[in-house]
Amino acid sequence: MYRMEKTADDAKAAVKAWMKSGKTAKNLENLAEFTEVSAAYLPFWRLIARGKACVCGYTEHKDSKGNTTRYPHEALINREYIYSEIACDAGDLGVRSIQLPENARAVSADTADLPAFPVTVSKDECRENGYAAIKKQAIKDGGGEMQSGEIGGFKFKYSTSFSKQLALDKVTFSRAFCIPKGFSLIYYPFYIVRYDFQGRSYTAAVDGITGKVVSGRAPGNAGRQSWFAGIGVAAAGMVAGAATASFSFFTGEDIKAAIAIIIFGYVFAGILTAIVWKQFRDGGEVLTGYAKGRGISHGKQISMVETVSADMFDYYG
């Protein structure tokens, strides 16, 4: 169990600062009515393991004559990873994993007199999930994401600095292993902050050690939605109109270029309209972390797999 470092007032202040985001309702930090701020200890299964991966592939280069030459590359990954997964049903809190900060202080785990959630998720299931996730991450770090694959039920296709650096056109082989070093159950402190706004209830979860908002739901900014929709639709219409009007400037053999411009303009206008529609449709709420609901995502999510920088060595060739 880790000690609570922040107070209820700190949690309220963190939520108020989070409410000042430009995507949330205007003046939300002053108009919201706080109804409850309660401490809670959530259980997490935590796996520490070494992930190893071997990834092989090649790049293709064409010369001036059109001849293609293949250059083979390989990557060997040997890193330590930490996987964490919530061990209870947290409802709509939107908390899925944690990363222990440097100032976290462990204390004797005694949940008898504390508001701790009961463990309801099997440790064997979480352990297997952790093995698969760490293998997946090792493959990702090695560049194996340049082809689609599946490990332990996890389907993947990624892009990493390694793949971008070598610009691999094909991965011919990838294999990963996971060597466990430690597996434990930990209780981590949070503050659950509930508030009302215009007749609706919202919730935010605040890290009890760092004081940061890790998940939450907030009402969206209606003015921003309207402005975004108006400007976006107008811009899409202008692009489509300009593309259509350009047709009159081309004649004869240039007609193919005119058709290409029109197609590009309409495709661009369609993409812009889709983005505007998503902002308008989902902008009624702002979601942070893994909070459930239809809304606009805001803020960084905590990854279930954390890479430990110390005691690792990789090879790229």
Image (tube, grey):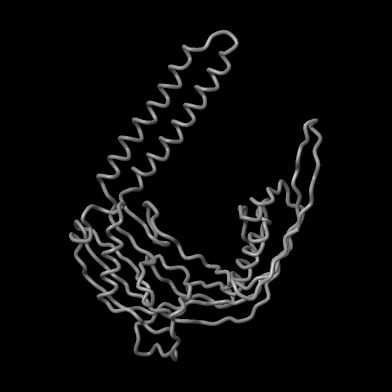
Image quadrant in which the C terminus is located: bottom right
| Res 150 quadrant in image | bottom right
**Most distant residue in the top direction:** 252
In this view of the protein, which residue sits in the foreground, 120 or 99?
99
Q: Residue at x 24, y 72 (%)?
A: 36
In this view of the protein, which residue sits in the foreground, 71 or 178?
71
67 to the left or right of 155: right
Looking at the image, residue 307 lies above or below residue 168: below
126 to the left or right of 79: left
Give coordinates of residue 121: x percent, y percent.
50, 75
| Res 301 quadrant in image | bottom left
238 to the left or right of 121: left
Image quadrant in which the N terminus is located: bottom left
Give coordinates of residue 281: x percent, y percent.
35, 44
Give coordinates of residue 297: x percent, y percent.
40, 54
Looking at the image, residue 246 lies above or below residue 271: above
Looking at the image, residue 69 lies above or below residue 219: above
Q: Residue at x 57, y 76 (%)?
A: 47
Give coordinates of residue 100: x percent, y percent.
47, 76
Query: Does residue 195 appear in this view?
Result: yes
**Most distant residue in the front direction:** 64
Q: Residue at x 25, y 75 (%)?
A: 9
Query: Does residue 174 appear in this view?
Result: no
